[in-house]
């Protein structure tokens, strides 16, 4: 059984269901990547797993526990970290203040965690007194990931972490994501730079119209001609 | 077609654009690449009239357009899309498209009352054009959806669609591909080539997907730290050591292939 699983999820934002029986799972230390056409429900599936969307059917379980009824705040306390696609940093706060906000729910001393984040992203240490809004796109994404890591999550969820970042920064981010996974954290991410993301993925999910179309290892999906043609741009 | 002469834009102490000079030839699809924070979007913002430059000048077809407002530039056929989509979130996708053409007779109360025929004819024409754009971008299934409910990638398509509602001379695309599925991005690439060949649109695009840039753009201008680093064909630029160092990188290094492990 997987460490984190959203099973047979069905639901939407009030109108028609966006997710129709979709299942997404990831284990500790693993990287799972969700790809698919625009509007397939990839971000919605992430939101459902994180509790930002009420499911009509289906279940979300973390480490064997049913968390379907928990609020996003309680899921953070249960060990989940989430980096949304846009508006994922406090632009007027400094880098360090952003990280402190990430530790908002912690009562203990989080200075060691902050030091770890600075180790992982040295550029953030350099810019720690600078407002996050003044950073470049790639650096902002690092702030957002760092912020999510401040709670010591067991699961890190990333919605298109490399959208709008340069190739060199994309490689760096993927490299850091591999480092994070190597520490035993489960990584679940949505990506449109699908080829590069599937390259580092243990599992890949291709979603179409709210349900699972293909599920396999990243390598197998990359090798599948149908998947390549329809979803990876050939 | 566009000439930018020694452009500077300083925000306080930050030199976002620091002496950039570029030329965009009529009928070209010019790529603009560079690291995050190189000043690419800021350069777009100055050309498209959102910011006044600290110094330097911008020309469109020999006419100086420095400091003109975005709507004045729109009437001259200069359009742009935004990196972060600017949709009217409570209007539908079709309504968003139909908002774009200017000077519709229905905008004037007098015409709306007394020239109903003209208003209806123009609206039908605008609607037809919107339908064409919707077909082209394959977003028919969300045409009546409020734009605020679209996914991130669908909003980017709507951004592109808005530029197709009028006859533009030059369109600036700011990361139209970010967050767009790669298969659909190929379709958008085809659309850009067709608009370029069949309707004579000139394009200038900021983009990070090098396959996309390589397929569409010639020349490619590389910016870094507010200046132009180099310019050339995609092949020349991809081989340039300074560009590899500052922007492209060399891919994931020293990592064993991971795919296939686990699962």
Image (spheres, coloured by chain):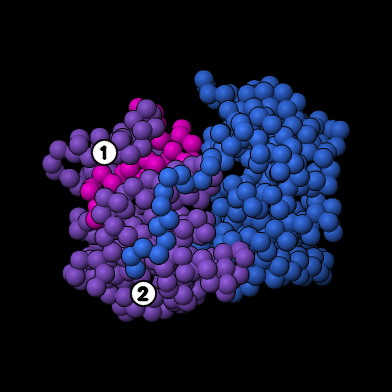
Chain colours: A purple, B blue
Disc 2 chain ID: A
- Horizontally, residue B161 falls left or right of residue B63, namely left
Q: Quadrant of the C terminus of chain A?
A: bottom right
Q: Of the two numbered discs 2 and 1 on the same chain, state the one appearing first in sequence.
A: 2
Asked if B77 appears above or below A39 in the picture, the reply is above
- Horizontally, residue A55 falls left or right of residue A195, namely left
Task: Name which quarter of the figure residue B117 lies in.
Answer: bottom right
Task: Name which quarter of the figure residue A104 lies in.
Answer: top left
Q: Residue at 64% of width from left, 44% of height from top? A: B206
Q: Secondary structure at mark 2?
A: strand
**Which x, y percent locates residue A48?**
34, 67
Q: Residues within 10 Å of mark 1 (few under 14, many from 20)?
A: some
Whether residue A18 is visible: no
Disc 1 chain ID: A
Judging by the rendered image, the residue that carries numbered circle 2 is A23
Judging by the rendered image, the residue that carries numbered circle 1 is A116
The answer to which of B82 and A31 lies nearer the viewer is A31
The answer to which of A185 and A68 lies nearer the viewer is A185
Asked if B234 appears above or below B119 in the picture, the reply is above
- Horizontally, residue B144 falls left or right of residue A60, namely right
Q: Which residues are magenta?
A: A128-154
**Which x, y percent locates residue B34?**
60, 37
């Amino acid at each position: 059984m997987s460490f984190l699983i959203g099973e047979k999820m069905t639901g939407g934002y009030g109108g028609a269901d966006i997710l129709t029986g979709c299942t997404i799972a990831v284990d500790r230390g693993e990287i799972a990547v969700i790809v698919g056409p625009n509007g397939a429900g990839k971000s919605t599936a992430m939101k459902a797993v994180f509790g930002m969307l009420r499911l009509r059917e289906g279940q979300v379980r973390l480490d064997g526990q049913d968390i379907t009824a928990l609020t996003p705040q309680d899921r953070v306390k249960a060990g989940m970290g989430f980096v949304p696609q846009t508006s994922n940093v406090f632009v007027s706060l400094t880098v360090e203040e952003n990280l402190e906000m990430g530790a908002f729910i912690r009562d203990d001393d989080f200075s060691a965690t902050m030091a770890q984040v600075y180790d992982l992203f040295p550029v953030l240490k350099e810019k720690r007194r600078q407002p996050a809004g003044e950073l470049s796109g790639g650096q902002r994404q690092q702030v957002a990931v760092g912020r999510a890591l401040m709670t010591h999550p067991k699961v890190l969820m990333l919605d298109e972490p490399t959208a709008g970042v340069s190739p060199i920064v994309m490689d760096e981010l993927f490299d850091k994501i591999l480092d994070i996974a190597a520490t035993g954290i489960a990584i679940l991410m949505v990506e449109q730079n699908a080829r590069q993301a599937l390259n580092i993925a243990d599992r890949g999910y291709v979603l179409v119209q709210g349900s699972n179309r293909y599920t396999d290892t990243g390598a197998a999906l990359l090798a599948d001609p149908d998947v390549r043609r329809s979803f990876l741009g050939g | 077609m566009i000439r930018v002469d020694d452009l500077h834009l300083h925000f306080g102490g930050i030199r976002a654009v620091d002496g950039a000079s570029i030329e965009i030839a009529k009928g070209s699809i010019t790529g603009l690449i560079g690291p995050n924070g190189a000043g690419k979007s800021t350069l777009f913002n100055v050309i498209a009239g959102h910011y006044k430059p600290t110094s330097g000048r911008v020309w469109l077809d020999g006419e100086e357009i420095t400091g003109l407002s975005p709507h004045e530039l729109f009437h001259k056929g200069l359009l742009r899309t935004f990196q972060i989509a600017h949709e009217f979130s409570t209007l539908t996708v079709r309504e968003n498209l139909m908002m774009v053409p200017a000077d519709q007779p229905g905008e004037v109360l007098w015409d709306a009352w007394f020239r109903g025929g003209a208003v209806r004819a123009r609206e039908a024409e605008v609607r037809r054009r919107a339908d064409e754009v919707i077909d082209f971008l394959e977003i028919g299934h969300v045409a009546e959806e409020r734009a605020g409910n679209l996914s991130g990638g669908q909003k980017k398509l709507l951004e592109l669609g808005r530029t197709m509602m009028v006859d533009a001379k030059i369109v600036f695309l700011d990361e139209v591909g970010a967050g767009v599925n790669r298969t659909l991005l190929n379709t958008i690439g085809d659309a850009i080539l067709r608009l370029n060949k069949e309707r004579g649109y000139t394009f200038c695009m900021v983009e990070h997907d090098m396959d996309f840039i390589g397929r569409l753009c010639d020349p490619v201008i590389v910016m870094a730290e507010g200046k132009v680093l180099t310019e050339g064909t995609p092949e020349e630029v991809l081989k340039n050591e300074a560009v590899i160092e500052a922007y492209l990188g060399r891919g994931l290094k020293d990592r064993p292939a991971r795919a296939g492990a686990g699962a």
